[in-house]
Image (tube, rainbow, N blue to C red):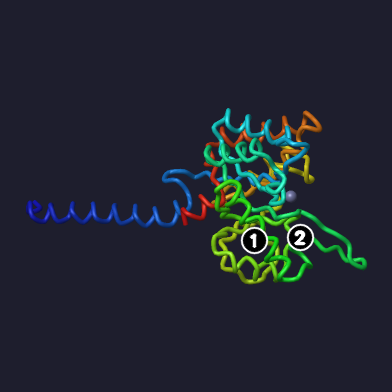
Amino acid sequence: MMLPEKKRMRSFFSIFFVVFILLLNGCSTTKNRPAGSTRPMVILKLDDLWFEDGLVHPGWIQVVDFLNSMKVKGTIGIVGNSLEEGDSTYFNWIKQRHEEGYEIWHHGFCHCRHQEEEVEIREYRGENLAAQTESLLNTQQLAQEKLGITLRSFGAPYNSTDQHTASALAEIPDLKVWMYKETDCSTDKFLLPRIAEVNIEYPVHQPDFEQFKQGYEQFKNEPVLVIQGHPRSWVEDESRFEAFKRIILFLVEEKVTFVTPYGYYLRE
Ligand SMILES: [Zn+2]
């Protein structure tokens, strides 16, 4: 028969061992995810908020109303020069979204491109360093001045950047996160990469539930999925908005956690 002392020691060691294994597992499997969840986190990277005809575009209103009704948090990529033109109704609409938990993020200043001798120059690809720095700072300062919001995340118009963009961004420490960086230039920003197979739109501007689902099944073990869409394009055709709704309903049923880019960065 085992001595009581020995028995106690043995059960102490077994408990210690179980706790140790649980801790080990906790470290390796739950990083970046809420405890106990095996689902990815999802960032709705919604692009192109402008001040148009004195209004917030109906596509945005429709999408935000729907997301709010589902208690889903989205994000809004603002184009900076709209803050030069916008009125108080426009600013208040954005501030309200910010208060609801949407992240308002930096989507360039003019979202423009032009041709120079056969070469297309885009805002942030092909422009010199001074121009890129000025454009990035303009949006950053306007957001602070007109909305009282410090922008924390950046995603370039057309997702087009070059080495100057990385250098210009390095001068803006308030911006912490860079979505869909497509070059290999070094940066100190936290990167949220694009997975081309899993998206809202196939091709761009056209939400497609079946293709989304296929991509999702393939990549659902990733810690985070950043899926891009353009709400302004979804009012043109009822079926586009319906497909977007199906995607959200599916993700809600999947019990994914919707996060913002900066919120995800802060979890790291
Ligand atoms: Zn855009």
Crowd around label 1: few <14 · some 14–19 · many ≥20 (10 Å): some
Q: To which quarter of the image does residue 131 belong?
A: bottom right
Please tell me whether residue 47 is drawn above or below residue 59 in the rendered image. below
Provide the secondary structure element on which disc 2 rests. loop
Counting labels gives 2
Question: Could you tell whether 97 is left or right of 161 in the image?
Answer: left
Crowd around label 2: few <14 · some 14–19 · many ≥20 (10 Å): many
Q: Nearer the viewer, residue 194 or 189?
A: 189
Q: Residue at x 45, y 46 (%)?
A: 34
Please tell me whether residue 32 is drawn above or below residue 99 in the rendered image. below
> What is the three-letter code of the residue carrying label 2?
Glu
Q: Residue 205 location in percent, x, y?
A: 78, 42
Please tell me whether residue 164 is drawn above or below residue 18 in the rendered image. below
Residue to which mark 2 is pinned: 123
Q: Residue 24 location in percent, x, y?
A: 37, 57
Q: Nearer the viewer, residue 173 or 260?
A: 173
Q: Residue at x 74, y 60 (%)?
A: 160
Q: Nearer the viewer, residue 251 or 158?
A: 158
Tell which residue pokes out farthest to the right in this image: 117
Provide the secondary structure element on which disc 1 rests. helix
Q: Residue 26 location in percent, x, y?
A: 39, 53
Cα distance between the residues tagged 1 and 2 = 13 Å
Q: Residue at x 76, y 64 (%)?
A: 125
Please tell me whether residue 173 is drawn above or below residue 199 in the rendered image. below
> What is the three-letter code of the residue carrying label 1?
Leu
Q: To which quarter of the image does residue 231 belong?
A: top right
Question: Is the residue under label 2 in contact with that under label 1 (CB below 8 Å)?
Answer: no
Q: To which quarter of the image does residue 110 belong?
A: bottom right
Q: Is mark 1 within 8 Å of ligand 1?
A: no
Residue to which mark 1 is pinned: 137
Q: Residue 218 location in percent, x, y?
A: 64, 48
Q: Residue at x 12, y 52 (%)?
A: 8
